[in-house]
Image: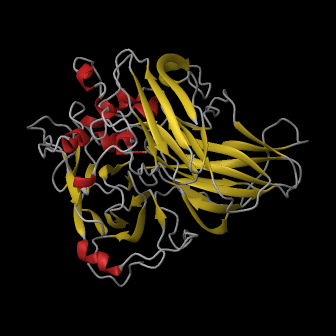
């Protein structure tokens, strides 16, 4: 399947109808961007043209394994140079997984300005349902462009930008009543699949639908043993595919969204409107729902319980993986005597990408001369590895940790410092996904096999934190890293044209 994307900027009214307008960056003029839909096994080709005047770009396919196609991962500074204004890059990769995911710009905080959209890959059915309502992306929305907010965030952590509103499928009302809710149109007596995606830059969402519990089918791109719940919590980048049964009275029902900024500060209250969207039964009036709920909406930052998220296809992580444990200490730093920039650190170093020197290029040139602050972690052999992310930070925040090129098995997680004992760890069919929350002041133990040679980023998906350095790169089986889909030189396209283009953030 082939898609053509043109990225351009425009001044548009805020999608929540607050009356203001701002600069946005859009794919083919729409927000959210077009849904990419493919079948399991398809080759997906996306031609991305950069029509921005002043900014580079690069599109990352979140959660897509990129098996043998590292150079199409879309990460400026790691797997490519930014696509320069006026240039086009072709991404080409195979859909080796199926389910729901999303794509977004991986250039600074640009996705917060609109360069984002859903990906649906149809595979074998893992549940019965009558209709697919498609993707339901939920995001935070700011009346100020992301690059401006990112600049502010670089200089102080005190008061990270608070969202002005949320958007469900690109729309919402504002606190004065303008705008409109997204609507899911259904008929009574059917089962519907809904694909919920958190595409925000800084917020965790809990979601619930009045009178309609969710049968949960997946965690990220991993089919799970289905379970029923009346509430789900998604950190940035996470997805759940759910089925609802329309067995209630013909009426309208609220789809509720509750926002957790920085672990429950819930700042948006009084600023935006926390409702969500409408489930509209055919035959019901065109009016807002009057439905109520007993569900107490969470405002926390904690992941869904891993005991609910049991992969459908079982897998065992070898307990010997503990022998490979690589510890990464997460901390922060700000020195008024130096540049006074707020940085997040892994083992004392903020990862600063060098857009002109993508690390994949360095590797393919046979060099080890990586730019400083590359935060490279080697995975030389083809076995399993265990990575221990340990917060030692005094600022206790949750961090949604996302890994490229793989999904990971969550072998352990908790508050405080891991004591090294294996008693409480899960090796037998642990939760498997591509994004998991590091608890505030806690630890996360992530295992995965080195079965995909490449240069892969792992980072906090809070856009400000990624820009502030909260990333590492895995150099996986470096001798076998190669472009194998044909256009091995493509990643370098644009590097030579990059100098001189100004970018803020
Ligand atoms: Cu959703 Cu590094 O990406």
- Residue 264 to residue 416: above or below: above
Instruction: Decide which of 322, 21 is in the foreground and name it.
Output: 322
Instruction: Decide which of 178, 13 is in the foreground and name it.
Output: 13
In the rendering, at what x and y percent does residue 107 appear? 35, 33
In the rendering, at what x and y percent does residue 103 appear? 49, 40
Ligand 1, by image quadrant, is: top left
- Residue 246 to residue 20: above or below: below
Residue 71, image quadrant: top left
Q: How is the image coloured?
A: secondary structure
Residue 395, image quadrant: bottom left
Q: Is residue 475 visible?
A: no
Instruction: Decide which of 234, 372 is in the foreground and name it.
Output: 372
Residue ID at (88%, 51%)? 188
Residue ID at (31%, 40%)? 79
Q: Quadrant of the C terminus?
A: top left
Left or right of residue 417: residue 268: right
Q: Quadrant of the N terminus?
A: top right
Q: Is residue 133 visible?
A: yes
In the rendering, at what x and y percent does residue 80 appear? 31, 35
In the rendering, at what x and y percent does residue 465 appear? 32, 44
- Residue 52 to residue 165: above or below: above
User: Farthest residue toward the bottom?
Assistant: 423
Left or right of residue 436: residue 505: left
User: Farthest residue toward the left?
Assistant: 337
């Amino acid at each position: 399947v082939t898609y053509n994307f043109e990225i351009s900027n425009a001044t548009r009214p805020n999608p929540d109808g607050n009356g203001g307008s701002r600069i946005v960056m859009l794919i083919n003029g729409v927000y959210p961007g077009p849904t990419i839909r493919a079948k399991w096994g398809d080759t997906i080709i996306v031609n991305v043209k950069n029509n921005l005047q002043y900014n580079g770009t690069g599109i990352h396919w979140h959660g897509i394994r990129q098996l043998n196609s590292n150079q199409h991962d879309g990460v400026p500074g790691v797997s490519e140079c930014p696509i320069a204004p006026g240039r086009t890059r072709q991404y080409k990769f195979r859909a080796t997984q199926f389910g729901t995911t999303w794509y977004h710009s991986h250039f600074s905080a640009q996705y917060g300005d609109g360069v984002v959209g859903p990906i649906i890959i149809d595979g074998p059915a893992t549940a019965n349902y009558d209709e697919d309502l498609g993707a339901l992306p939920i995001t935070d929305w700011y009346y100020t462009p992301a690059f401006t907010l990112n600049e502010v965030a670089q200089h102080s952590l005190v008061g990270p930008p608070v969202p002005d509103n949320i958007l469900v499928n690109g729309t919402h009302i504002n606190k004065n009543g303008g705008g409109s809710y997204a609507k899911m149109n259904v008929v009574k007596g059917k089962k519907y699949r809904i694909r919920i995606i958190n595409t925000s830059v800084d917020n965790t969402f809990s979601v619930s639908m009045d009178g309609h519990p969710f049968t949960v089918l997946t965690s990220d791109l991993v089919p799970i043993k289905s379970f029923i719940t009346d509430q789900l919590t998604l950190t940035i980048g996470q997805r759940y595919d759910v089925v609802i049964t329309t067995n209630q009275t013909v009426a309208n029902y609220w789809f509720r969204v509750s926002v957790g900024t920085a672990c429950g500060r819930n700042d948006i209250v009084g600023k935006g409107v926390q409702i969500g969207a409408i489930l509209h039964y055919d035959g019901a009036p065109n009016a807002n729902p009057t439905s109520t709920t007993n569900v107490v909406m969470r405002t926390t930052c904690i992941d869904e319980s891993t005991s609910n998220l049991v992969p459908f296809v079982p897998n065992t992580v070898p307990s010997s993986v503990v022998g490979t444990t690589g510890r990464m200490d997460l901390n922060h730093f700000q020195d008024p005597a130096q540049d006074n920039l707020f940085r997040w650190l892994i083992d004392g170093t903020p990862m600063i990408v060098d857009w002109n020197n993508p690390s994949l290029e360095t590797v393919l040139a046979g060099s080890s001369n990586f730019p400083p602050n590359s935060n490279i972690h080697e995975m030389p052999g083809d076995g399993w590895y265990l990575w221990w992310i340990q917060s030692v930070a005094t600022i206790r925040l949750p961090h949604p940790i996302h890994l490229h090129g793989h999904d990971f098995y969550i072998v352990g997680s908790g508050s405080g410092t891991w004591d090294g004992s294996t008693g409480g760890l899960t090796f037998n069919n642990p939760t498997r996904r591509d994004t998991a929350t590091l608890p505030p002041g806690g630890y996360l133990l992530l295992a995965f096999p080195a079965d995909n040679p490449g240069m892969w980023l792992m980072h906090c998906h809070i856009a400000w934190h990624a820009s502030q350095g909260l990333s590492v790169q895995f150099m996986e089986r470096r001798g076998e890293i190669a472009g194998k889909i044909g256009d091995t030189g493509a990643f370098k396209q644009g590097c030579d044209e990059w100098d001189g283009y100004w970018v803020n953030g």
